[in-house]
Image (cartoon, grey):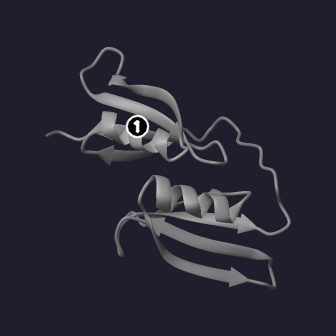
Amino acid sequence: MQFLHTMIRVTDLKQSIEFYTKVLGMKVLDHSENSEYRYTLVFVGYEEGGTSIELTYNWDTNNYDMGNAFGHLALGVQDIYAACDNIKALGGNVTREAGPVKGGTTHIAFITDPDGYQIELIQLSK
């Protein structure tokens, strides 16, 4: 088996694509529309054939209940402090500043996307 993607529902597709491509540096890997069932799928990620995020936009829905079961997406970064500074400069929302995880030495931060999904940034080993 191979892990392919995670799907999240978004309320403003243009804003979500802009966030994932401009703020997080991903690329649009695939795009499809289904006019019969009124939805658009956009896959974003860092590399073709790698794990991606499926942004699902249901044309007639502009609000979702986030619930409390989903936790977060996680991205590894080379320099977590620079990444947070860059995300803020690009208009992103850092909700937990970079620093060591409680009770550990790994440095993490949290940001949110335009729909409020949490994304954990994890400092990769140097």
* Residue located at (40% from left, 37% from top): 84
Q: Position of residue 62 (x, y in %)?
A: 82, 56
Q: Position of residue 102 (x, y in %)?
A: 36, 16
Q: Where is residue 83 in the image (x, y as percent from the top left)?
A: 36, 42
Q: Which residue lies furthest to the front in this view?
A: 89
In what element is the residue under mark 1?
helix
Which residue is labeled 1 in the image? 84
Q: Describe residue 81's horizontal placement relative to residue 4 as left or right.
A: left
Q: Describe residue 125's horizontal placement relative to residue 117 as left or right.
A: left
Q: Which residue lies furthest to the top in this view?
A: 103
Residue nearest the observer in this picture, 50 or 28: 28
Q: Describe residue 99's horizontal placement relative to residue 120 as left or right.
A: left
Q: Where is residue 46 in the image (x, y as percent from the top left)?
A: 37, 65
Neighbourhood count class around disc 1 (C-alpha, 10 Å): few under 14, some 14–19, many 20 upward? many
Quarter that holds the C terminus: top left
Q: Describe residue 88's horizontal placement relative to residue 31 as left or right.
A: left
Which quadrant of the view contains residue 98?
A: top left
* Residue located at (36% from left, 31% from top): 108
* Residue located at (32% from left, 33% from top): 81
Residue nearest the observer in this picture, 79 or 66: 79
The answer to whether any part of residue 1 appears in the image is no
The count of marks equals 1
Which quadrant of the view contains residue 41?
A: bottom right
The answer to whether any part of residue 121 appears in the image is yes
Q: In this view, does 76 lie above or below 5?
A: above
Going by the numbered disc 1, the residue's amino acid type is Cys
Quarter that holds the N terminus: bottom left
* Residue located at (51% from left, 38% from top): 111
